[in-house]
Amino acid sequence: MAFAPPVLEIRGLHKAYGQLEVLKGVDLTARQGQVISLIGSSGSGKSTLLRCANLLEDSQQGDILFCEEAVHWRGAGHNRRPADAAQITRIRTNLSMVFQSFNLWSHMTILQNVMEAPVQVLRRDPKEVEAKARDYLEKVGIGDKANAWPAELSGGQQQRAAIARALCMEPKALLFDEPTSALDPELEQEVIRVIKALAQEGRTMVIVTHDMNLARDVSDHVIFLHQGLIEEEGAPDALFGSPKSERLRGFLSATSH
Ligand SMILES: Nc1ncnc2c1ncn2[C@@H]1O[C@H](COP(=O)(O)OP(=O)(O)OP(=O)(O)O)[C@@H](O)[C@H]1O
Ligand SMILES: [Mg+2]
């Protein structure tokens, strides 16, 4: 695993919103087949890091590499922007994001939601995309909901539809931002089962989560962010079993109740 090629590398990333420094030099490497979990208190910069990784947010300093290809920038500091539009599209479409709030389009059926980006953005053949979309809906356990509207689904079903939509892009990695935290506990489990199955089949994933059991069960590597810096990182057994940092110990004891 340590020698699998890297899909996503972030080196020394700095991000500020105006005067507010949110990321202060963060590194992350997700190799092919690896599952990385990001944990940390509210406001520590977890969502910001994911959003910078797929270029939804600008960053001011540091490198982002996708499949060993460095993002080209123009300008510097607060004026730094990705320079190459084709590269932005390539990276965004290959790092599919799943959000806490699902973000399904309410005016489209579930099947249309899953097909939309592969057909409209990647210009794939609609017939082939439809067959794949139906397969992915089956895979996440909602094959029977293809023609339903998002509002007709439970939260857990909507989130599984959002995962099918991300998978239908056939991305190199999936980025999850708190995929279960908007769900009731019993619905959470059906989404966790899907995420675990994806980990089992060797998908590359970066998961921001408040669910320490999920982080412990699925991750190869866990990163604890504190105020925009990596306070501690390592294998889940080490990190959860014998945390070294006082802050991580405090965080874990606060989240275990
Ligand atoms: N668009 C924005 N404009 C200004 N400040 C922002 C913006 N987005 C996030 N922030 C600030 O950046 C910091 C990090 O936010 P971020 O959303 O990355 O935290 P997080 O670790 O994901 O927290 P949570 O666990 O609550 O989701 C916070 O102080 C937040 O207020
Ligand atoms: Mg967040």
Image (cartoon, rainbow, N blue to C red):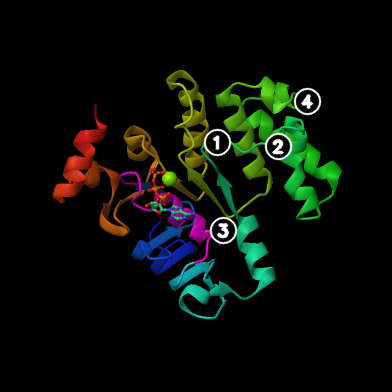
Instruction: Check disc 4 and report the residue beneath it.
Output: 147
Instruction: Check disc 3 and report the residue beneath it.
Output: 56
Give the Cα distance between marks 3 and 2.
Answer: 19 Å
Side of 5 relative to 23 (left or right): right
Q: Nearer the viewer, mark 4 or mark 2?
A: 2
Q: Quadrant of ligand 2?
A: top left
Instruction: Check disc 2 and report the residue beneath it.
Output: 105
Give the Cα distance between marks 1 and 4.
Answer: 21 Å
Residue at 54% over, 66% down: 67
Give the class, few, some or many, for how many residues have Cα within 10 Å of label 3's Cα (few <14, many ≥20). few
What span is colored magenta in the figure?
39-58
Give the Cα distance between marks 3 and 1.
Answer: 17 Å
Say what secondary structure mark 3 lies in.
Answer: loop
Give the Cα distance between marks 4 and 2.
Answer: 13 Å
Say what secondary structure mark 2 lies in.
Answer: loop
Determine which quarter of the picture holds residue 227.
bottom left
